[in-house]
Image: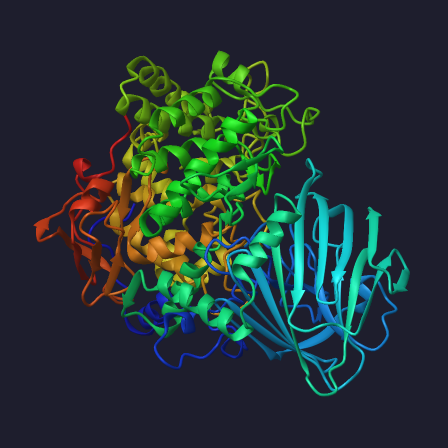
Amino acid sequence: MHRIPRPRLRGPAAALAAAALLGGVLTAGATAQAAPRTDGRLTDLVNPFIGTQNEGNTYPGASVPFGMVQLSPDTGHNTGYDYGENHIRGFSSVHLSGVGCGLGGDLPTLPTTGDVTETDYAKYAAEFSHDDEKASPGYYRVGLKTGIDAELTATQRTGVQRYTFPATDKANVLLNAGQSLHRTLSSDVEILDNRTVRTAIKGSGFCQDTKAYTVYTVTHFDRPFTTSGTWNGDTVTEGSKKSSATDARNGAWLRFDTTKDRTVEATTALSYVDAKGAALNLRAEGGRSFDRVEGAAQRSWEDRLEGVKAQGGSDELRRTFYSSLYRSFLAPNVGSDVDGRYTGWDQKKHRAKDFTYYQNWSLWDTYRTQAQLLSLLAPRESRDMAISVLRIDAESGWLPKWGYGTVETNIMTGDPVTPFLTNAYQQGLLKGYEEEAYRALKKNADGVPATASAPVGREANVEYLKDGFAPYISGRPHAKPGDSDYDHGASATLEYALSDGMLAEMARDLGHDADAARYGARAQNYRKIFDPSTGFFRARDASGAFTGPADPAQSEGFHEGTSWQYQWMVPQDIPGMVDLIGGKDAANQRLDSFFAYDKLLADPAKTAREVWVNGPYAYYNADKYNPQNEPDLIAPYTYLSTGQPWKTTDVVHAALTLFTNGPTGMTGNDDLGTMSAWMVLSSIGVFPVQPGTDTWGLSTPAFERVDIKLDRRYYPRGSLTVSAPGASDTDRYIQSARIDGAQQSRTYLTTDDIRSARSLSFTVGSEPSAWGTSPEDAPPALG
């Protein structure tokens, strides 16, 4: 156990460790990717190529905050773009940042020259080089080796492309309706006139088949094409105006004469409702030049990024910070058309009144970090997002788990929608909807969806409510597409118990005292899977017997993790979990082993990169911290509850070195902004240690000062300044903290503290102190 004060590194070793801690590693070629900083704009600090290699699965293309359209190149990787590939198959209209399976990629569009002979985009793909490619928020450009320059930008519901062709009378634009990143079930293409093409694309997918959904598009060109045609399968037909296909290649090609005017601009509008919706979106948001649209997109991003002004830190840190902040605003996505109509999960048309309808819910990921960041920086949109989730329940009969577009995918396990919605409630975003939200959450927590419905909900709830745990039943046939809680019974138990704890808080606030007591008792169910013989959580089978290897690093029944990594995921009752382990001394020894703390002190960046990280999908067979994946996101903050808060800073700042300004600069999949939001919040020094409540843990900021602009409708003070004068790689330990000048010994804040305060200031030094080490300073157990 390390006690205060601990031995301090000196000489060259200390210098190397300090330099590594927050400086990061600049990946070769990174400076050629992002637009250079020229006039002080925050958007110039953003590198959209971060995470495009080594399975970060981000995309570099153009979008606006929370936009329906994400216009980006696809290179052949199953999720869209991979920096290691050098051919572009098309610029498609739908992408999600950091997903782990093929999703979206609808209507890949590619400019070509010459005769149209190939219909498979893997064969007609155009070669490119990163030396002739750049991106910034709302803009992407690439020079294809066919001699064509392609530029992309976007509005909320449209994507705009500008192509600069060589002088030729055979300049083509290929609209591919039959191929995408998911399975395309069917497609319809219709050339309406000599400037306009309409499509309807029915798709299914995301790790497995789902119910079908349809995306409608209409593409309008700024000039008439000279001739056109369609293709169906291998057959290319000049002059054809319509083409339909089932599970086959299908598309339209348009030809332009660029011997004099070499540029062609095209605007594609999307709708998840119908062709009328796409036309209305085009009419409302189209009709502007590429340059005007690009300027508006850049301004929308600048406005978002200006909500957080960071001072101090290295240039590398600032670039990775603002790149992470950028990615945090990419999803969820607008799902309603300009007239308010949207397709609900009952596959019927509805109209959003007094709110914007959003879709794409990676809840197992986002409930831990991104939902909380958006509640601070985008509360109006966050409120609409929460209302949208409630509409899913009202229209389909059940709350979502992992929703894409208009359908449930049932990807991941547990009960992530509960902490997502209780967070919205605790942050004051559900005024007027409190009881509706509570009823939906209660139904979800106490039942299981009908067999005929798409969601699985709490799939193992019958057993959980009876026995206090979800059984691990390997190989059990799946009743519905997606993941099964039975395949991950141990982690599902922890997730259910976490959600019960958060729902108990909401029930208590709303005066549902009997429910609060019942859910509060269920929040203790994590104890049911604690094996005293190993001192770790362990899966139990249907008979109640512990099952799987006793070695917690080889454990079974945990989703994307091991018992070591799930040990710390009891945010509703860290003191109780610590007591199970054997008290604070035993917990700290286990935490130190988990984080390889001795190695971390000697070389934090090397420990993060070589001891913690074993590969983008290396979730199993490990006894160390995995900063790349969701189950471990809260783990560094456990030290706040064990009397050693300075170690939280050591671990967090070492993990921040994994975020670098290059294509491999993401820690695993971004998962719709989850990892990016972790980076932003941890850099600010305020982190949601109990997701689903209003509790924010504290650690040393990575910057000397951060000014956060807050919406006065939800935060009356309108701003919060977090400062740590003199904070550096060596002077990173909190000596004292103040809120508006008053001493703050607690290692956490509440949302009410943030609403009432103007400043949170830290005094920092080169050695750990006694700040936050008293038992009463730790975040309290719920209830």
The extreme left residue here reads 742
Asked if residue 392 lies left or right of residue 120, the reply is left
User: In the rendered view, how is the structure colored?
Assistant: rainbow
Q: Which of 552 and 36 is in front in this view?
A: 36
Which quadrant holds residue 306? bottom left
Q: In this view, does 504 lie above or below 70?
A: above
The x, y position of residue 168, in whole percent, is: 78, 84
The reply to whether residue 491 is visible in this rendering is yes
**Residue shown at the point (17%, 35%) measured from the top left:** 776
The x, y position of residue 563, in whole percent, is: 49, 35
Q: Which of 567 and 616 is in front in this view?
A: 616
The reply to whether residue 592 is visible in this rendering is no
The x, y position of residue 567, in whole percent, is: 43, 35
Asked if residue 129 lies left or right of residue 191, the reply is left
Q: In this view, does 591 lie above or below 581?
A: below
Question: Can you say which quadrant of the picture contains the C terminus?
Answer: top left
**Residue shown at the point (66%, 44%) measured from the top left:** 206
**Residue shown at the point (81%, 79%) measured from the top left:** 170
Question: Can you say which quadrant of the picture contains the N terminus?
Answer: top left
Which quadrant holds residue 504? top left
Q: Nearer the viewer, residue 643 or 247?
A: 247
Asked if residue 276 lies left or right of residue 464, the reply is right
The x, y position of residue 277, in whole percent, is: 60, 48
What is the number of callouts on the image?
0
Which quadrant holds residue 540? top right
